[in-house]
Amino acid sequence: MSGKTASSPYPCVIVVGAGVIGLAIGWRLAQAGVAVTLYDKGAAGSGASHAAAGMLAACVEAEPREGSLLALGRASQALWPAFAAELEQATEIAIGLRCEGTIVAAFNDDDRARLQHHLAFQQSLGLPVTWLPAADVRRREPHLASTLVGALWSPEDHQVDNRRLAAALRAAACAAGATLHEHAPVERIAHDGKRTHGVMVAGTLQRADIVILAAGAWSRDVPLAPPVARLPVRPVKGQMLALRMDPAAPILRHVLRVPDTYLVPRHDGRLIVGATVEERGFDGDITAGGLLSLLDAAWRALPAIEELPVDETWVGFRPGSRDDTPILGPGPMDGLIYATGHYRNGILLTPITARVIADLVLHGAIDPLIGSLGAARFQARAAAE
């Protein structure tokens, strides 16, 4: 990637999208002395970054045929403690990184058989997960339902407060010198077929040497003109809610995953319950059926939620790619970089995405972790089919 300015050895960069991914990239580039400008169609951090639960679940979400995603997730998990500490020091905003680990509970023999099968697969990958009998689980979480038969225990899958994370990244990026334009939708990415020239905003060309597309579920709606193949990124709707616990006497302390839902406790007493998975485009309706399915699954695992007040309900849109794996790396022309399609792992992958994309901009280096995660993989698969 070329295009250095007279005042800087680095190219001018525009980041399209100011969720946690775009903000973290902008922060890292601004720290390095890059002239970086971010545009977002709404308020920074108001999309999937605001809606997420903040789970850092590389281990318990490991699935067959996701080797590249697992390697990326584990690398990002390793970065999180230092990343959080640096961000909090830079902004004095506590982002709520909690390291109690994750419990995946079983409440009948079918649950146990399914989880132990999954456990064997995860252990075959060398992941630090174990099985806990019911008595050990109950010592950690005494309010779980009486039908508890055991749980998968993942001590390295943690959580962070995603909304505080977004606020801290916004502050850090701006303090480092990045320019942020909120409520400024990008109409299109301008190029001549060989390289990008910048982006059109309010009918005006904003010039840049490099454009990084990090618009999450809206990435497909940012056209390139002249047109090229559109990114295979779609919105995957998720309905969620938050209940209110007593912070001094919470009924849950660990991230808890159970059939059909998960529960994430915050230090301030909020208990996040999520999330539906719906292929309904940008349908923002909160439905009785969606909330009922979450509350019923949560109540079966943790009956004490029955007395908790409902604090908030909301809808978010995960950016799902065709294979639900991130799209990271160079685009189809010089000066275009993709950093999107993180699906349900955007918060987990924030530190590693910022690092590998910054390295690509600053040094032209494609990290081996993202070597197979470029957009070209979809074309290669289509040709092979």
Image (cartoon, rainbow, N blue to C red):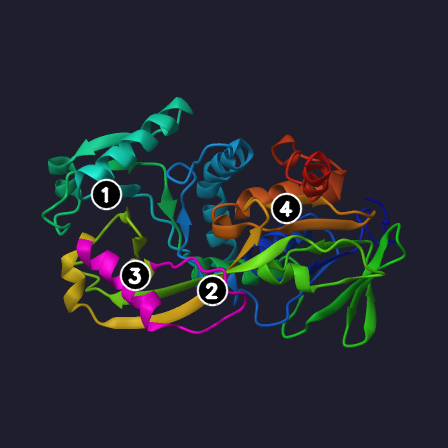
Residue farthest along the front direction in this orientation: 385
Which residue carries the number 2 mark? 316
Q: Position of residue 367 (x, y in %)?
A: 66, 34
Query: Which disc number belongs to residue 42?
Result: none
Q: Residues within 10 Å of mark 1 (few under 14, many from 20)?
A: many
Which residue carries the number 1 mark? 105
Q: Position of residue 264 (x, y in %)?
A: 31, 54
Which residue carries the number 3 mark? 294
Which of the two marks, 3 or 2, is nearer to us in this view? Answer: 3
Which residue carries the number 4 mark? 327
Label 3 and label 2: CA atoms lie apart by: 15 Å
| Helix, strand or loop at mark 1 | strand
Q: Amino acid at mark 3?
A: Leu
Q: Earlier in the sequence, mark 2 or mark 1?
A: 1
Of residues 79 and 52, the one nearer the viewer is: 52
> Which picture quadrant has residue 162?
bottom left
Q: Earlier in the sequence, mark 4 or mark 1?
A: 1
Q: Amino acid at mark 2?
A: Gly
Label 2 and label 1: CA atoms lie apart by: 25 Å
Q: Position of residue 88 (x, y in %)?
A: 46, 53
Location of the C terminus by quadrant is: top right
Q: Is residue 118 left or right of residue 244?
A: right
Answer above or below: position of 175 versus 108: below
Of residues 214 and 79, the one nearer the viewer is: 214
The answer to whether any part of residue 311 appears in the image is: yes
Q: Earlier in the sequence, mark 4 or mark 2?
A: 2
Q: Amino acid at mark 4?
A: Ile
Q: Residues within 10 Å of mark 4 (few under 14, many from 20)?
A: many
Q: Which residues are magenta?
A: 274-300
| Helix, strand or loop at mark 2 | strand
| Helix, strand or loop at mark 3 | helix
